[in-house]
């Protein structure tokens, strides 16, 4: 009884902080508040601000959204299926859609980027900025281990396994085990 009362008031406080962060600092302020929110409230507030999230999803604390949309629903580019686990301090860029399908697992400190940019100009007057964008899809049952960087436009196949500290810059087919910087398939498992 007492625990549920405390959680109720804690939920009210986090609701106020989310609204305050959004109104005062915009969508990046909302993302900063969500990074500090306890994991028991995280899914609720991601859904509130537009993310599509399935059942039995567990997201650890420190979850950060980079570049949320400047819309009423800033997290609508995020789609998470059922039975998904996301570890501590994961960064997801929402410049383009990120789709995490059912039963996939994302380890701690994984970074998922949907854009990259580079500058050609060497002076302020000659700013030649190029940006590359692409959605990221992680298929059902895929395992992404800690400290992996996933670049834009990548699809990781069903039940694929990506080892820790890898950089995924190309598609990984289903049932494959891949590792390295840049990624290389080291084993293909039969279905």
Image (tube, helix red, strand yellow):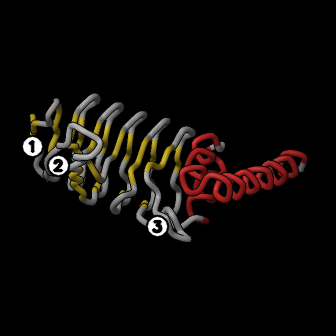
The answer, for residue 32, to whether it is visible in the render is: yes
Task: Answer few, some or many: residues within 10 Å of disc 1's Cα (few below 14, many 20 plus, some between 14 and 19).
Answer: few
Nearest to N terminus: mark 3 or mark 1: 3
Q: Is residue 11 left or right of residue 128?
A: right
Q: CA distance from mark 2 to mark 1?
A: 6 Å
- Residue marked by disc 2: 175
Asked if the residue at tag 1 contacts the one at tag 2, i.e. Cβ–Cβ closer than 8 Å, the answer is yes
Alpha-carbon neighbours of circle 3 within 10 Å: few (<14), some, or many (≥20)?
many
Where residue 59 sits: x, y (%)? 52, 46
Q: Give the residue number, with chain letter if any, for mark 3.
A: 76
> Is 21 in front, or is 163?
21
At x 17%, y 39%, the residue is 177
Give the residue number, with chain letter if any, for mark 1. 188
132 shown above or below 165: below
- Report which quarter residue 77 is drawn in: bottom left
**Nearest the eye: 66 or 54:** 66
Q: Residue at x 80, y 55 (%)?
A: 12
Mark closest to the chain's N terminus, 2 or 3: 3
Residue 109: image location, x then y, percent: 41, 34
Q: Distance of mark 3 from mark 1, alpha carbons?
A: 34 Å
- Residue 23: x %, y % from top left: 67, 59
For marks 2 and 1 on the same chain, the one whose residue lies earlier in the sequence = 2
In the image shown, does 156 or 121 lie closer to the viewer?
A: 121
Please give the count of numbered marks on the rendered protein.
3
Q: Give the secondary structure at mark 1.
A: strand
Q: Mark 2 touching mark 3, by CB under 8 A?
A: no
For image coordinates 25% across by 32% down, the residue present is 163
SS class, disc 2: loop
């Amino acid at each position: 009884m007492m625990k549920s009362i405390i959680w109720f008031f804690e939920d009210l406080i986090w609701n106020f902080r989310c609204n305050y962060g959004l109104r005062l600092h915009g969508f990046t302020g909302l993302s900063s508040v969500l990074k500090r929110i306890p994991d028991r409230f995280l899914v609720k507030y991601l859904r509130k601000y537009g993310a599509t999230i399935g059942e039995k999803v567990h997201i650890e604390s420190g979850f950060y959204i980079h570049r949320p949309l400047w819309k009423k629903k800033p997290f609508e580019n995020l789609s998470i299926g059922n039975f998904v686990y996301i570890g501590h301090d994961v960064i997801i860029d929402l410049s383009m859609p990120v789709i995490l399908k059912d039963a996939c697992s994302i380890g701690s400190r994984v970074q998922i980027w949907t854009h990259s940019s580079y500058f050609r100009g060497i002076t302020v007057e000659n700013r030649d900025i190029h940006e590359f964008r692409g959605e990221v899809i992680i298929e059902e049952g895929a395992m992404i281990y800690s400290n992996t960087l996933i670049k834009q436009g990548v699809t990781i196949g069903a039940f694929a396994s990506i080892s820790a500290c890898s950089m995924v810059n190309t598609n990984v087919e289903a049932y494959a085990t891949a590792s390295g910087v840049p990624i290389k398939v080291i084993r293909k498992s039969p279905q």
